[in-house]
């Protein structure tokens, strides 16, 4: 009987460990899995060349699917994740930011906000992202947009964080230049995210 109990306990522990690790590594728990989106880091933007690559393991593919990324081949699209502002603080709905960057060496680009449930923020603002077709380039060669809950009502570009909670941003580059694909850490100038201030409890 003791042998049967030991086998049963071992089996249960194995199933729980396997299921728990699978849920963790595919992004179904509050804790971010290790490794993914961490291979490349450029000024708080992180990426992983395995995304969209035949070399991606099953966990990576499941996590990409969970995050709602299309996961095209790297030659077609690369993805950079941002979860903090330039001060290293988590991106939050109750804070306002300015995002600004150079036009990347790519056919097309976009920056999209995803809420804490990995979906687009649930609001009717129709301001989930900024992209190459909507960005206005300043005389200094930089495009800019605000990220905040409320419409700035001044006609400037705006990404709405209403109902996003703690959110993150995905920077997509489509058909990036070969130099960007091979040496992003030295070639790619990623957007800055400057905090303007927070409001409400826990703002600091």
Image (cartoon, helix red, strand yellow):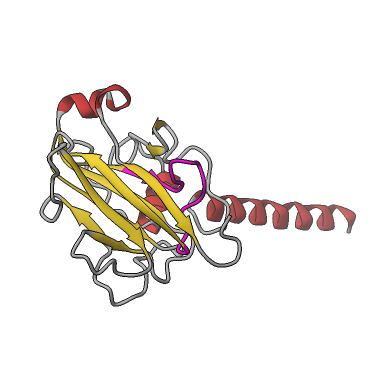
What predominant SS class does the magenta segment belong to? loop
- For residue 76, say whether it is visible: no
Q: From this viewpoint, is residue 105 visible?
A: yes
Q: Nearer the viewer, residue 40 or 83?
A: 83
**Which quarter of the image is occupied by the C terminus?**
bottom right
- Give the percent coordinates (x, y) of residue 129: 25, 59
| 2 up-or-down from 152: above or below | above
Residue 40 at x, y percent in the picture:
39, 31
Residue 20 magenta: no
Callout count = 0
Q: The N terminus is located in which quarter? A: bottom right
Range of magenta residues: 80-94
- Residue 121: x and y in percent read 37, 68
Q: Where 109 falls versus 198 (above or below)? A: above
Residue 68 x/y as whole percent: 33, 58
Q: Residue at image x 10%, y 54%?
A: 133
Residue at 42% in and 66% down: 164
Between 53 and 43, the one lying in front of the other is 43
């Amino acid at each position: 009987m003791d042998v049967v109990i030991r086998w049963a306990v071992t089996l249960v522990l194995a199933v729980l460990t396997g299921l728990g690790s699978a849920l963790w590594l595919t992004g179904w728990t509050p804790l971010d899995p290790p490794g993914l989106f961490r291979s490349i880091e450029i000024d708080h933007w992180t990426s992983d060349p395995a995304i969209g690559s035949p070399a991606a393991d099953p966990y990576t593919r499941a996590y990409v699917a969970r995050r709602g990324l299309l996961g095209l081949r790297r030659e077609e699209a690369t993805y950079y994740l941002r979860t903090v502002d330039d001060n290293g603080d988590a991106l939050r709905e109750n804070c306002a930011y300015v995002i600004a960057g150079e036009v990347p060496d790519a056919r097309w680009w976009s920056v999209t906000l995803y809420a804490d449930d990995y979906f687009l923020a649930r609001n009717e603002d129709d301001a989930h992202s900024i992209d190459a077709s909507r960005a206005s380039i300043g005389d200094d060669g930089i495009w800019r947009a605000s990220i905040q809950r409320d419409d700035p009502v001044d006609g400037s570009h705006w990404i709405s964080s209403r109902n996003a909670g703690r959110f993150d941003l995905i920077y997509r580059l489509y058909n990036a230049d070969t130099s960007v694909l091979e040496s992003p850490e030295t070639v790619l100038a990623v957007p800055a995210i400057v905090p303007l201030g927070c409001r409400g409890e826990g703002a600091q």
